Image (cartoon, rainbow, N blue to C red):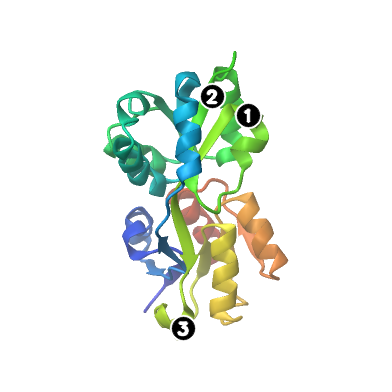
Amino acid sequence: MSRYVLVTRSEASLDEIRAALAPHAIEAFAYPVLRDAPIEDVEGWDRVAAALGSLRMIAMTSARAADPFRRGALSRGLWPTLGTLPVAAVGRATARAAEAVGLRVELTGNAGAAALVGELAARLVGGAAAVHPCGRDRRDELGEGLRRAVVPVAVYAMDTTPVAELPELPAEPPLAVLLSSPRAARAYAAAAAGRFAGVPHLAMGATTAAAAAELGLAVATLAHPTPDALVEELCQICS
């Protein structure tokens, strides 16, 4: 492999990154340290059903949540109502995933979940709330910022991929390692065992950067969690 970036995501999630890197003759190597796991959040869906009358928005912080949220709502007879709520999405990929299942995106933020809190707070007044389809091991940035105005429901889960099932790491080091979440950073550090310790590590958010720093990794935070921001950072690394 020639010039490449190691990304702690699956092959299926790298299309946008690959498209952004291609003009610069840089490849993306998928190193999916986390993988899908089955989940059934009965209590979470019960909370959503109980709060249905007060829900005014869907706060979606991961593209992975869109399809299982729709399927879970359909199976419980909640989709006719939930499907009409506008979405506040973190990132363009999440917005597109929401639109792909028939939802209407009203807000799109590119600076992480915490940055979306202010805009949501202005809309969630007078007892109004937002449903937050999320991962089982979510960081509760929305809940902390909006207190009781968020109703979380776990619609997906990610477990650590056994090292034996990960692809073999290339012999030559990457230009950089892109860390997609705090859990991914920890799983990557355990799996790679310091193999690329001297390579620049890039985090897709401040919490991910903090987790990587705690692991002793030299890490920089992307200005925005987008493929374009990744390209800009790589240009600086290569210059």
| Sequence-earlier tag: 2 or 1 | 2
Q: Check contact, mark 2 vs mark 3: CB within 8 A.
A: no
* Residue 108 showing in the rendered view: no
Type of amino acid at the residue the image marks with label 3: Glu
Q: For the residues marked 2 and 1, what is the alpha-carbon distance in whole angstroms?
A: 8 Å
Name the residue rendered at 29%, 36% in the picture: 74
Q: Is mark 3 on a helix, strand or loop?
A: loop
The mark found on residue 129 in the picture is: 2
User: Image quadrant of residue 81?
Assistant: top left
Residue visible at 57% across and 47% down in the picture: 223
Distance from label 3 to label 1 (Cα)?
49 Å
Position in image of residue 192 (x %, y %): 54, 79
Image quadrant containing the N terminus: bottom left
CB under 8 Å between callouts 2 and 1? yes
Label total for image: 3
Upstream in sequence: badge 3 or badge 1: 1
Local packing at callout 1 (Cα closer than 10 Å; few below 14, some 14-19, many 20+) is: few
Residue occupying the far bottom of the picture: 171
Q: Name the residue under label 3.
A: 172
Mark 1 lies on residue: 148
Question: Dividing the picture into quarters, in which one does residue 215 lie?
Answer: bottom right
